[in-house]
Image (cartoon, rainbow, N blue to C red):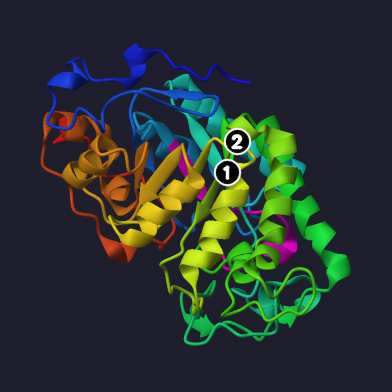
């Protein structure tokens, strides 16, 4: 396992962060086993740059190394099995070759003092038959299609998700095993931690929310039952990576990918209270602004708590100062500003990203955004 506390000379601007406009955001923090020089987190983002076989290309090493002044970086959602795939260009982690490619990425990041986390996911119903083994139907908690949800294709178009089938009870231990296997390979590849993607309509979110989960067995019905698969997956992943190197991402307020719940406060409070018993490195709440729901879930989760969702430096500094979160993750800002920490520290102008290149593949819009020193 690489050293978790990197050389500060490689990671931190020369001025004292206490003199910055954002002293709370730029102060050190400990998340589980990770001692980080700042609370600026690079959020997981879909970039669709992997090879067709799910192998992370060499450009990933350069991309994450460019952004290594972040407190930590979370990778794209990474597929844990052939069944987990939901869109082309997604990286994966179930084969030896995929693991070796990720090892090159972590080596590039650690060479410049960065901290990097692999996000593990299963897309569930957010898929099409053409992407599934033997062209089978995608799987989900229940046979409930994601309406008005268009998924990217290899041809650059978007098509509706296919009707899923409900996973059988006998298949659920296999889902847990896929996540555990992904975590084992992630740690072997040199990642500093892993994050479980249970947000934005992916499979674990499909089990959590009653708008999709219509099961009548012990994985459906009550909020406790609907949280059961997430908890089993998290326990299995924590056994492989260590609880203090495991995080979970949730999105209780998001309707993305046709997700809904009749009582999100109840559903996610139950999930957060159970997750808190596992002493995880963090709970990562997406779309979590300064709302009543965020405050209540923060109390259910306890520390460490990470927020994501449209923050800038000032609003992020404020929620940390008020102890609503220990860290804040930034997505779109990191696409166009590889030196985001340094820009926050200097209170410098931010580059505006080009959405046309977010998922276009190749190095344009990926590796070519300038740092302040290059302008």
Q: Secondary structure at mark 1?
A: helix
Q: Identify which residue is drawn at 38% across, 31% down.
A: 71
Quarter of the image for the C terminus: give it: top left
> Where is residue 132 drawn, in percent x and y?
72, 72
Q: Report x, y in % for residue 248.
A: 55, 48
**Is 366 above or below relative to 268?**
above
Of 142 and 83, nearer the camera is 142
Q: Residues within 10 Å of mark 2 (few under 14, many from 20)?
A: many
For the image, the number of numbered tags is 2
Q: Is residue 295 left or right of residue 313?
A: right
In the picture, the quarter occupied by the N terminus is top right
Q: Which residue is mark 2?
A: 279
Badge 1 crowding class, 10 Å Cα cut-off, few under 14, some 14 to 19, many 20 or more, is some
> Image point 35% across, 41% down: which residue?
325
Q: Which residues are magenta?
A: 73-88
Secondary structure at badge 2 equals loop
Q: Residue at x 32, y 49 (%)?
A: 335
Instruction: Report if the CB atoms under discs 2 and 1 are less than 8 Å apart.
Output: yes
The tag on residue 276 is: 1
């Amino acid at each position: 396992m690489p050293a978790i506390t990197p050389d500060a000379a490689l990671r931190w601007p020369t001025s004292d962060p206490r003199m910055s406009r954002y002293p709370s955001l730029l102060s050190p923090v400990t998340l589980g086993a990770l001692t980080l020089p700042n609370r600026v987190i690079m959020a997981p983002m879909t970039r669709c740059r992997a090879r067709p076989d799910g192998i992370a290309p060499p450009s990933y090493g350069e991309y994450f190394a460019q952004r290594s002044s972040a407190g930590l970086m979370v990778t794209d959602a990474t597929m844990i099995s052939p069944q987990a795939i939901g869109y082309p260009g997604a990286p994966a982690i179930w084969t030896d070759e995929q693991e070796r490619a990720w090892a090159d990425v972590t080596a590039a990041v650690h060479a410049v003092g960065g901290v990097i986390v692999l996000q593990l996911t299963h897309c569930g119903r957010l898929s099409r038959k053409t992407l599934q083994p033997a062209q089978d139907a995608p799987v989900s908690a229940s046979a409930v299609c994601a309406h008005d949800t268009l998924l990217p294709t290899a041809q650059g178009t978007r098509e509706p998700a296919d009707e899923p089938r409900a996973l059988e009870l006998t298949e659920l231990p296999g889902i847990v095993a896929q996540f555990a296997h992904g975590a084992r390979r992630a740690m072997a590849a040199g990642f500093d931690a892993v994050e479980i993607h249970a947000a934005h309509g992916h499979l674990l979110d499909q089990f959590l929310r009653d708008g999709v989960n219509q099961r009548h067995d012990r994985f459906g019905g009550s909020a406790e039952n609907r949280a059961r698969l997430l908890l089993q997956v998290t326990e299995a992943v924590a056994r492989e990576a260590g609880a203090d190197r495991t995080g979970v991402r949730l999105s209780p307020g998001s309707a993305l990918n046709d997700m809904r719940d009749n009582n999100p406060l109840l559903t996610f409070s139950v999930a957060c209270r159970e997750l808190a018993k596992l002493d995880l490195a963090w709970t990562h709440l997406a779309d979590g602004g300064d709302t009543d729901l965020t405050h209540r879930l923060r109390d259910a989760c306890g520390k460490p708590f990470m927020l994501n969702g449209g923050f800038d430096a000032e609003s992020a500094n404020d929620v940390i100062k008020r102890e609503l979160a220990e860290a804040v993750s930034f997505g779109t800002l990191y696409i166009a500003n590889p030196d985001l920490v340094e820009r926050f520290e200097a209170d410098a102008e931010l580059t505006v990203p080009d959405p046309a290149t977010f998922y276009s593949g190749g190095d344009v819009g990926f590796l070519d955004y300038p740092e302040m020193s290059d302008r």
